[in-house]
Image (cartoon, rainbow, N blue to C red):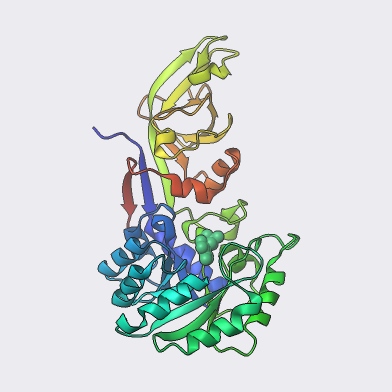
């Protein structure tokens, strides 16, 4: 018997969220971001849910090869570019577009030039203040000139990444960054892509040839606020069952550390899901869990394979009752907030031992 814990991926939700991104920026083409195994949803599901995307973007080279082998023929963008010269061979063979974000990548490309079968499309990554990847603004004209003179370079595009697209009050806001970006590429010819999900949702005025939405496509809000209000649908529902029930007398404890003490007769449901499945161990007491469709609070410490909930209010619930940890009926953003993290982390953290199911497009 397999454990009852399953992550169900809803392909219609992926499709609908992509359509919402399209509606937010109707004139931009979409790089659907599928890094980190499509934010934990699986590349196969992403391929089916995002058939309407104009391109897929990610940073794992083995996964990019899998996308091509699975039949994706539209553009693929490697968001961090080549890590070594062998990657450029892969890019050549599978016709992948690459980001160039530092000088080493520039010289790798020069060195690889004679062995490439056809020019590669490249994206110059511009550091507009986030200070992770990219050439500084003052270098863009010269980097462009170098690339333009390489016969192994095809189309040149420009991109940057926002640190705070969800917050205009931030010390470094998207408008600041966009201004930097625009001045860096002044007079240069090429397509641009700037917006992540927050940029797509909260900077509709910011025009670009391409957008790069990630988390919103999976149904979570980049701000952690109400994704439902934005119109996003949860693409992953993590569900399980009650596998045991305990009746605690007042004064009894539950779980490791005995951090929960019953103050009255308490019915405790034991759920087959723990931190070895990706459920956050630091989820606080009171984190909502759906049992038989009703919200109940998490109690006690999340352990490796189990967690416990207070089902005193649900006397009818028996072993085998359905449980939802997040997804349909229980926004992942809420669970993330109760665990002092963001939905991104929860999605990506689902571990390989969790069974997967796919809800097909109707
Ligand atoms: C991950 C990533 C995105 C997507 O960001 P979201 O906040 O998930 O929308 C966009 N661009 C780059 C370069 C990324 O690495």
Residue 51, quarter of picture: bottom left
**In the image: residue 153, left or right of residue 206:** left
Up/down of 310 relative to 280, above or below: above
Residue ID at (65%, 80%)? 184
Where residue 117 appears, as percent x and y from the top left, is: 29, 84
Residue ID at (30%, 81%)? 115
Where residue 286 appears, as percent x and y from the top left, is: 59, 31
Q: How many marks do you count on the picture? A: 0
Up/down of 277 relative to 199, above or below: above
Name the residue nearer the viewer: 15 or 253.
253
Residue 176, quarter of picture: bottom right
**What residue occupies the far left of the structure in this picture?**
1
Name the residue nearer the viewer: 93 or 289.
93
Residue ID at (30%, 34%)? 3
Where residue 315 appears, as percent x and y from the top left, is: 47, 22
Up/down of 320 relative to 237, above or below: above
Q: Quadrant of the C terminus?
A: bottom left
Residue ID at (46%, 14%)? 247
Where residue 337 appears, as percent x and y from the top left, is: 60, 43
């Amino acid at each position: 018997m397999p454990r009852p814990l399953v992550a169900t991926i809803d392909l219609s939700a992926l499709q609908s969220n992509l359509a919402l991104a399209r509606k937010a920026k109707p004139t931009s083409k979409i790089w659907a971001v599928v890094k980190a195994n499509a934010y934990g949803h699986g590349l196969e599901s992403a391929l089916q849910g995002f058939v309407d995307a104009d391109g897929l973007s990610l940073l794992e080279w083995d996964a990019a090869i899998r996308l091509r082998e699975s039949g994706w023929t539209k553009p693929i963008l490697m968001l961090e570019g080549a890590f070594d010269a062998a990657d450029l061979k892969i890019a050549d063979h599978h016709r992948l577009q690459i980001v160039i974000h530092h000088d080493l990548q520039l010289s790798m490309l020069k060195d690889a030039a004679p062995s490439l079968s056809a020019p590669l499309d490249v994206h110059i990554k511009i550091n507009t203040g986030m200070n992770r990847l990219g050439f500084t603004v003052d270098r863009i004209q010269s980097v462009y000139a170098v690339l333009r003179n390489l016969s192994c370079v095809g189309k040149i595009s420009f991109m940057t990444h926002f640190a705070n697209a969800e917050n205009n009050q931030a010390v470094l806001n998207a408008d600041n960054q966009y201004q930097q970006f625009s001045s860096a590429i002044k007079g240069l010819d090429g397509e641009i892509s700037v917006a992540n999900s927050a940029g797509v949702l909260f900077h509709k005025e910011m025009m670009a040839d391409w957008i790069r939405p990630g988390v919103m496509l999976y149904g979570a809000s980049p701000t952690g606020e109400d994704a439902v209000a934005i119109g996003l649908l949860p693409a992953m529902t993590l569900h399980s069952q009650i596998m045991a029930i305990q009746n605690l007398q007042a004064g009894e404890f539950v779980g490791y550390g005995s951090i929960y003490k019953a103050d009255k007769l308490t019915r405790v449901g034991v759920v087959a899901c723990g931190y070895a499945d990706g459920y956050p161990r630091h989820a606080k007491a009171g984190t909502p869990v759906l049992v038989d469709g009703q919200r109940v609070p998490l109690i006690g410490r999340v352990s490796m394979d189990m967690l416990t909930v207070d089902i005193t209010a649900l006397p009818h619930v028996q072993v085998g009752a359905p449980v939802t940890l997040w997804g349909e009926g229980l926004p992942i953003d809420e669970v993330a907030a109760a665990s002092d993290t963001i939905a991104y982390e929860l999605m990506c953290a689902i571990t390989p031992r969790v069974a997967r199911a796919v809800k097909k497009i109707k």
